[in-house]
Image (tube, grey):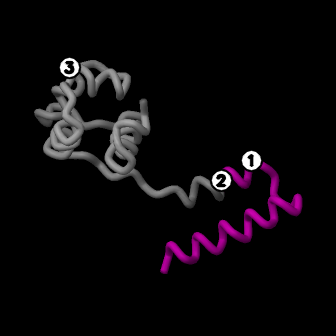
Amino acid sequence: MKREIVGAVHSIARDLHTAGFIDKRHMQHYDALCLEPVPAYSKTQVRALRKRHNVSQAVFAAVLNTTPSTVQKWETGAKNPSGPSLKLLNLIDRKGLEAVL
């Protein structure tokens, strides 16, 4: 139900922005409220995602613009992906490796 309310508010805000009652800065705030949260990826999920696309840690790191040692740390649980890397992992998970190439 919360999702429906947020969607309705966003739709109204978009219409008000189009009509000139809401400026671009405030519209960006409404847009941000409607973004889906990016799920966390466990070491098992990172490894499974990499293996599903049949790439090495080095290739996976290059695609994610990080280092092979970082991917290795994610897969051993020494570190957790965050920020842009987490967003890219989610994109690869949903759309495939080709979406970021």
Q: Which residue is mark 2?
A: 29
Tag 1: residue type?
Arg
Q: Quadrant of residue 68?
A: top left
| CA separation in Å, label 1 and label 2 | 7 Å
Q: Residue at x 15, y 34 (%)?
A: 75
| CA separation in Å, label 1 and label 3 | 39 Å
Tag 3: residue type?
Ser
Q: In terms of secondary structure, what is the magenta stretch mainly?
A: helix
Q: Residue furthest left?
A: 76
Q: Which residues, given as a range, are shown in magenta?
A: 1-29
- Left/right placement of residue 83 relative to residue 23 reads left
- Left/right placement of residue 64 relative to residue 69 reads right
Residue situated in front as seen by the camera: 92 or 3: 92
Tag 2: residue type?
His
The mark closer to the camera, 2 or 3, is 3
Q: Which residue is mark 3?
A: 69
| CA separation in Å, label 2 and label 3 | 36 Å
Q: Which residue is mark 1?
A: 25
The answer to if 26 sits in the magenta stretch is yes
Q: Tell which circle, 1 or 3, labels the residue nearer the N-terminal end.
A: 1
Q: Residue at x 43, y 39 (%)?
A: 99
Secondary structure of the residue carrying numbered label 1 = helix
Circles 1 and 2: CB atoms closer than 8 Å: yes
Q: Position of residue 27 (x, y in %)?
A: 72, 54
Q: Tell which circle, 2 or 3, labels the residue nearer the N-terminal end.
A: 2
- Left/right placement of residue 34 relative to residue 55 reads right
Instruction: Note whether 21 is above or below 91 in the view shown.
Output: below
Secondary structure of the residue carrying numbered label 3 = helix
Q: Quadrant of the C terminus?
A: top left
